[in-house]
Image (tube, rainbow, N blue to C red):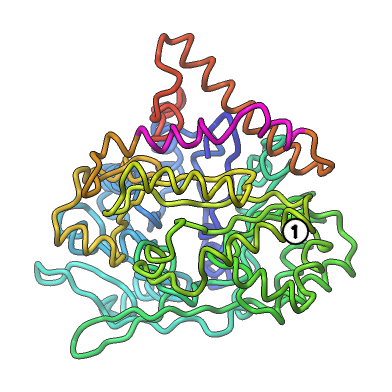
Amino acid sequence: MNEHDNFMMPQSLPSLAAVLRDAGMRVRVIDCLPEKMGWATLERRIREFSPDVVAAGENHALYAGEVLKLVNLVKRIDPRIVTVLGGAHFTNLPERYLPKYPIDYIVRGEGEITFRELLKALDSGTQDAEQVEGIALMSGGKVLLTPPRKLIEDLDSLPIPAFDLMPMDRYGQAKRLFNAGAMTIHHSRGCGARCSFCVWWTQMAERKIKDGCETLHPRWRTKSVEYTVAEIEILYKQYGRRSLVFVDPTFNIDSAWNDEFATALIQKGWPIQWFAFMRADLILRDERLGVFEKMVRAGLAHLCIGVERAEDADLKGWGKNFYSKSQSVEAFRLLQSKYPGVFRQATFILGVRSETPESIERQLEFARLIDADYPAFHAATPFPGTDFWQEANENKWLEVEDFDFYDMSTPVMGSEKMKREEIDLAIIELSRRYVGVKWFLKGILSSSAYRRNMYLWWAMVSARIFASTTLQFVNPFRHDNYTRLVKPKWYDG
């Protein structure tokens, strides 16, 4: 996340690397952030390794500029090196990037099999890369999209991620955030919903061709409990990890899987705590079935629920009609009364088209009503590939087109009643008004060590930012002190 805090392992890198290595390819992974590797050092590493292919990607939008800087660097080092990009951002914008940048191929959607088959085709020299399903490339001066590749039906058929190729000792170094030694993991891919503001589901969507046009359909798949536990065992025994951060878009879709997983972890008896993104309605379902209690006993210590808005009409307008405000309230009250040791995080979206000062106030009131430990107030951000992006472009709502600002904290457009700058100020104001001495004491006096650590982390980060900005004679309450890309000292070195 940042050099003073906690870098987390990108799930794509070890997953892709394992598949390529199993296919007999020589693979090297470079994760510049945790290694604090600047551009000059990266260039030396690439020259020393002398690769045939360099690949990188971006899922949302924020680091797209860094990826483009990389492909320019690679082609300057050696124009013969093949550049391959992936992730939802480049998958959804091939026409924007392929004609203008030295990108040879874009792997579209789920990457493992497509990337492997593309490299096999390039290596053999006998198979035309244009015959590989699931890629985009320039052909005859035009952008060519090959037919979409089918999703991997059996995720257990994939090899265990290549953790040994990653700088494992550099991840999760924060002493308090997500507990000490946190490590990312996922058991499922995709989502059963297609919320109009969310780009997450598009990367793992099922792609079909209808009347000559590609359509996206939500799909959810999961690894088996046995596979997931085997992966955890490696992280636990070989790498000493005691805290897991599940990055699944929706962890708790399948109640039977949740039950079996919780049972397996309880039987193992490992002192592991874990974080997950969950849906409020499915929490209530699993509580009625007696499954949620088992999940807490199995180490569930931190939940993030996409509450998003206080108004059900807004939820339905985004296609998020599978639960309501009342279910969010019920889920948070359940957590507060029966599972007080679980850290309760909620996400809200501010800056929708109908936003007014009064509606922003309702979001704060709702956050207080559910008594979230941490309400994350995000700016409504139209990411490429979403219905929200298409609508924003068609109606010319976007005021900021530089993806360096698409951090979900910086508004990139105003609403019908509020300027972008007013929404920007409101986001930080809501956070400031939510916290206070009473709020802090509630967390720091908790009987749960995990919750105490999270409150201490928040306080320490805020104090550090406040101190550093004050020493620089910068307003410590400016929103961009807490968001936006920051250039570390080692960036160019």
**Where is the C terminus found, in terms of image quarters?**
top left
Vertical side of 210 occupied by 292: above or below: above
Rendered image quadrant of residue 286: bottom right
Amino acid type, mark 1: Leu
Judge from the rendering whether residue 225 lies leftward or rightward of residue 70; answer left or right.
Answer: right
Question: Residue at the front extreme?
Answer: 358
- Residue 129 lies, in percent from the top left, at 29, 75
> Which SS type dominates the magenta stretch?
helix
Vertical side of 313 occupied by 413: above or below: above
Residue 279 in view, yes or no: no
Q: Residue at x 40, y 73 (%)?
A: 194
The mark tally for this picture is 1
Extent of the magenta region: 425-444
Rendered image quadrant of residue 210: bottom left
Judge from the rendering whether residue 14 lies leftward or rightward of residue 404; answer left or right.
Answer: right
Judge from the rendering whether residue 342 lies leftward or rightward of residue 27; answer left or right.
Answer: right
Relative depth, front residue between 451 and 201: 451
Q: Is residue 431 magenta?
A: yes
- Residue receiving disc 1: 300
